[in-house]
Image (cartoon, rainbow, N blue to C red):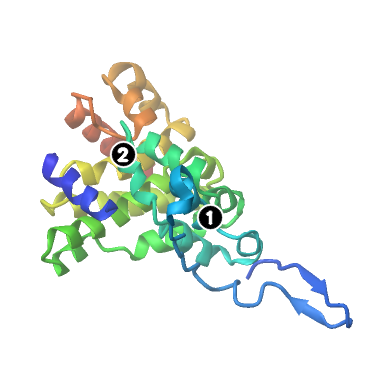
Amino acid sequence: MNKWKYLFWVFLFGTLCTFCEKDDGDTVDICSGFVNNVFKYTFYECTEADSLDCSQKIIESVLLPEQYLECSSTDSLVISCLNYPFMGYIWVYNSIQQGFDRVMNMFNGFDELFDREDANTELIKVYQDMKPEGVYDYSEPAEQGAYMAQFTFIEITLAQYQLINKLQPEETKLLLEVCLDKFYKKSEIPYYSWIGAMSVLAIMGRVLLIQDYQPFIDGLTSVDELNDFLILADFCGLNNIVEITQFIIENVENYLIN
């Protein structure tokens, strides 16, 4: 576990647009350059005068401008959110869910994304195209950690109830199929270990919970620590990892068959 935590710590270190009028009467498209572009983050450079305000100014410097939030297409907003420079904060707290909650409090992109009706569609598209085996393209531990972290970033995003509650029936089935595929591919690659399984299992477990899938609901009382895992989206501090994993996978497979 320490090895993989180290890797992640190394890594740590069209939409409707609004128009306005110029004084001369010419219409200006304030969304020009924003609609299909991924946002490019730039950090505030602290000076001695900043003193204790430096860290807060850095955090504020990577907030998405209101103009971008209003104008960006959902597919570009998805990538901008996943590229948030402090996304690695999910590893700082006791669970990745607590870490994501902190990111949500720091960053304004996810609130906008979660309000978009097509957020799940665009996130699933990105997730489908991601290849767990791509980690083999890198030889340096920092590069491998950064690559694997991208899966955790998008998976913990997809695991949020704000999105799961909005899944359409066809999206629910597709998401579970994609998650199951990613889980099995990760399980064949030693680099991912159980840390790489947590967030994808959290998606599947929470989806089954919201779907009120009775065999899974029964497990909330019969499978030790299952409810804790659904809350935390993390195995840290839990002892029943194997049974929880097997239970979630078995129920997903049965749900997709029925």
Is 238 on the left-hand or right-hand side of 117?
Answer: left
Q: Position of residue 148 (x, y in %)?
A: 24, 55
Question: Residue sitting at 40 percent across and 63 percent down?
Answer: 126
Q: Residues within 10 Å of mark 2 (few under 14, many from 20)?
A: some
Q: In which quarter of the image is residue 34?
A: bottom right
**Mark 1, other Cα within 10 Å: few <14 / some 14–19 / many ≥20:** some
Q: Which residue is labeled 1 in the image?
A: 63
Please say whether residue 176 is visible from this viewpoint: yes
Judged left or right of residue 218, residue 198 is left
Helix, strand or loop at label 1? It is loop
| Identity of the residue drawn at 45% across and 57% down | 123
Q: Distance between the residues labelled 1 and 2?
A: 20 Å
Residue 140 position, x and y percent, is: 12, 63
Q: Do the residues labelled 1 and 2 touch (CB within 8 Å)?
A: no
Q: In this view, does 81 lie to the left or right of 220?
A: right
Quadrant in the rendering for residue 209: top left
Q: Residue at x 43, y 63 (%)?
A: 125
Residue at image coords 67%, 72%: 31
Q: In this view, does 252 lie above or below 64?
A: above
Q: What residue type is labelled 2?
A: Val
Residue at the far front in the pictured view: 49
The disc labelled 1 sits on which kind of residue?
Leu
Residue 92's mark?
2
